[in-house]
Image: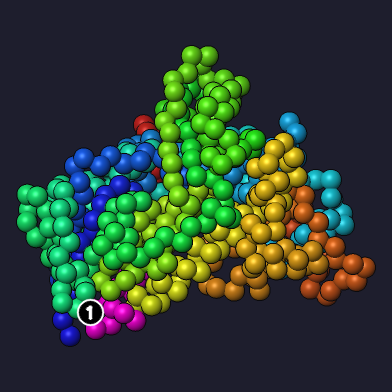
Amino acid sequence: MQALQHIVIAGGGSAGWLTAGVIAAEHAAGAGARVRVTLLESPDVAPIGVGEGTWPSMRETLARIGVSETDFVRECDASFKQGSRFNRWVDGSAGDHYFHPFVLPQGYGETNLAARWRQLRPEQPFAQLVSFQPELCLHGRAPKQFATPEYAAVSNYGYHLDAGKFGAFLRRHCTDHLGVRHISDHITAVSSHENGDIAALQTRQHGAIEAGLFIDCTGSQSLLLGQHYGVPLLPQKHILFNDSAMALQLAYPEQGSPIASCTLSTAQAHGWIWDIGLPTRRGIGYVYSSAHGSDAQAEQALHAYARATGGPQDLPSPRKLSFQPGYRERFWHRNCVAVGQAAGFLEPLEASALAMVELSAAMLADTLPAGRATMDTVAGRFNEAFRYRWERVVDFLKLHYVLSRRSDGAYWQDNRGAATIPARLQELLALWRHQPPSRHDFPRIEEVFPSASYQYVLYGMGFETDYGEGRRRSDRPALADASFAEAQELTRKMLAGLPANRDLIEHIKHRGLVRR
């Protein structure tokens, strides 16, 4: 069996360099490494520069590749994210909001929290009864104390970051510490073996670059999997309508302005606006459906939002982005794997893009075939796993739109149309009318979104589960009451003991975090 000795990653940015780092840390760094990793990127292709939100999984990924969290925060203009706040998604009223925090509900899986909440405290927002984290977000608290070590958490967290700086930071780390070879050159052609495998990438200045495995991180162009192999994109616009975005970067009104501890998502007539707080600026953008609203309407709405939330009166024109929501029919074909936008992209809601990159890189590193003889077996498993994951992301994102009661235009009404709702999601919604989401609905070990996330969104959006008159023994209402009380006590303690988000970031910049 011919051993796999060289991996070439086509394309840089967050997707390419995260993938390079995870694979190299596992297989290519240090003495006795069995593979070499080369990343080839065009010097003329600039990173997209959005995708600034991550999940808590990023902490494990960065630790796995040996990155210092202190260095990461300092060099990537990073801040701490503890979930998402959804404004005006339910009915569009001024006070309409709910949270999807990163912390699991207190006592989750041990008792029927949703049933007891509806019976005992239906007037209180579900997330704020079962979790301490929404209050931390409301008060702009950090997820850890000054003395908490790197990557450790008092409150579960991910990050907001500058995507351009993140890619450059990863490139330096991968080339300086993990042995990744970096080539800046243009791909001019793809050469194939007689069996159809890719043999080499032809470049302008470095000639043919041969490898046993090629990873396509060339973004929406998908030069290898999409263009060379013709693996089609499965469009999802019939389910998720958004295909455009207008993005702006805003300075804070004052140097010490508070930094939001969560992503803010505010629903609009034709989509929604993201609002992400970094240490040096805010990043905002309007994600919308071009079939329901014009570019001019989106720009006007984004400017109005910016001014209403502390932005200046004189605003620049936003940057326009277009995308086709969908994912590849398969992700690993012969000796080529697509990661990042080359594999697919849906929309920024719930920040799944970087998480899918992390999951892809981890599975590649953990199941890397020893050679070509076993590659098809590994590829089959990879394709099955990621087809399932992309389908679940579609379901979860659609859930937000299906449950909205907004009536200010065709966009929201069309989103509730039965023909636009995936069959599996329709079945689950019917089931959840009588029982809450549980682990039985999402049985895989590594689900993209756990059942707790579905509960946060369902009950935050006003969905009602009718449990009838009977109660099951496993409902354990006394334990649910104790869990509610514990969540409230944790809220009190953490509000008193955790610093502001900006205060922790300033501490890291000047003094750093304790290395573990």
Q: Quadrant of the C terminus?
A: bottom left
Name the residue: 53% across, 40% down.
290
Determine the main secondary structure of the stretch shown in magenta.
helix
User: Residue 361: in sight, yes or no?
Assistant: no
Relative height, residue 363 to residue 326 (above, below): below
Residue 261: horizontal and vertical position, in percent? 55, 38
Name the residue: 38% across, 59% down.
343
Q: Is residue 507 left or right of residue 27?
A: right
Q: Nearer the viewer, residue 291 or 406?
A: 291
Q: Amino acid at mark 1?
A: Arg
Name the residue: 87% across, 54% down.
120
Q: Which residues are magenta?
A: 361-377
Q: Secondary structure at mark 1?
A: helix
Q: Nearer the viewer, residue 75 or 85?
A: 85
Provide the residue designation for mark 1: 372
Q: Nearer the viewer, residue 76 or 181?
A: 181
Would you say residue 301 sits in the magenta stretch? no
Outermost residue to the top: 314
